[in-house]
Image: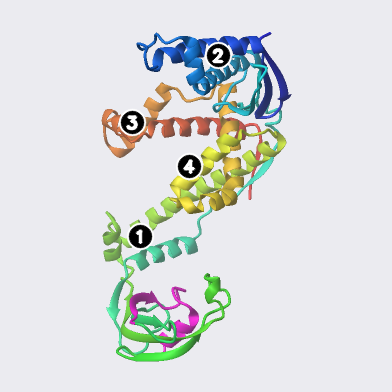
Amino acid sequence: MDIQITATKSEGAERRLQIAVAATRVVEARTKAASRVAKQVRVPGFRPGKAPVAMVRKQYGAAIDQEAVEALLREAFELVVTEQQLELVTQPHAHDVKFGEDQSLSFELHCEVRPQLTLEKLEGFRVMRPTDTVTDEQVQEQIERLRDQRATWTPAEGKAKEGDLVTVTLATEEDGTIPEGREYRLVMGAGQVIPAIEEIVMTMNPGETVERSVTWPEDFPDEAQRGKTRQVRVALTEVKRKSLPALDDAFAREMGDFDSLAAFETVVREDMAAAAVRDADAAARTQLLDEIVQANPFDLPPSWVKQMIRAYAEAYRIPEAELVKFGDEIRGMAERQVRRDLIIDTIAEREGLVATEKDVDDKVAELAEKRGTEPGPLYASLQKAGRLRELERSITEERVFTWLLGKNTIEQA
């Protein structure tokens, strides 16, 4: 055969194949490449495409060799995919290309293929579902958080207390001098400034300015500043104290269409209960998938993990300079997510659980009814926002988890 293929790695999500192209096939490829190049280049003294091939080969030998090698690589790629029946997940790469003086060509082809999941163990797992009970105390804590969001700040006399909002001008010694300071608004006790400076501020009255020696803590984020002592100038401009709204029917009306505080508390409890159920279900599903992953090991294509890392980096807006460090930190998370998605896809395809167009249409109609709108405009809006695929995915995942939960034991914590 003109092209010989020898597998050097034939398991897992990666394939490595040694390719050897016979000299006769290389000569043929060079001849075709020379003919193509001759039609494209201009040789002085000859009309385009009329220069002798021998002259073209002499002047453009490197370009001819490159075109011949690229053509042979493409041919080898196609032959490998057909013969080996590979389901590629990314473009193959040629490594260690050797173009010998004897006209032979050899190289190693690296491929990534879709893992073939057997998923032999999907049943018999036992996982704990966290409690989804919402207590009175949790409801009151949530209402207090909402109440805190509606708080107003009013000027206060005297020294600042923990929880007060202060306006200060801070300046730190640099090269033996204290420059002009910068204005900050800080909540005392919130950890927005080092404790030593907070202590200084809480001894002052509005309008005062003090200079004191301050030592930076040993756990300060900037290692260069840890343990260093500097002069600091602090000027306190204003102290404001938080004033919470009264917890009454008026507050409930401010929070929405509620006739009374009792009605508001009822809705808060219902929303928290629904969220608790979702969280508990999600936790149980995550545990179950973790069990399935451990019981059904398989290799992952490296490119899929890299794609997931890039997606996380874009979502978190990671600067280019921090991408490598970020990737190392979340690689485990990215691998778990890829495995999770692949398992769900495999089960959905195998068990006929993939959402259909009708399923998506029905879901859009359901959402439209809840929102009091027409399905058509909502469908168009979701399509424009690129969220129909997300909706289809959520339907498929829900079906897969329903199928899995029916075959395993979920215990309530």
Q: CA distance from mark 3 to mark 2?
A: 50 Å
**Residue 261 covered by magenta stretch:** no
Q: CA distance from mark 2 to mark 4?
A: 43 Å
Give the secondary structure at mark 3.
helix
Residue, far front: 45
Give the secondary structure at mark 1.
helix
Q: Mark 3 or mark 1, which has the lower sequence index? A: 1
What residue is pinned by disc 4?
A: 311
Q: Position of residue 290 (x, y in %)?
A: 65, 41
**Residue 196 covered by magenta stretch:** yes
Numbered disc in front, either 2 or 1: 2
Q: Position of residue 300 (x, y in %)?
A: 63, 34
Q: Mark 3 or mark 2, which has the lower sequence index? A: 2
Q: Which range of residues does the magenta coloring cover?
A: 180-204
- Vertical placement of 311 versus 406: above or below? below
Q: Mark 2 or mark 1, which has the lower sequence index? A: 2
Report crowding for label 1: few under 14, some 14 to 19, many 20 or more residues within 10 A (C-alpha): few
Report crowding for label 3: few under 14, some 14 to 19, many 20 or more residues within 10 A (C-alpha): few
Label annotation for residue 30: 2
Q: Contact, CB < 8 Å: mark 3 with mark 1?
A: no
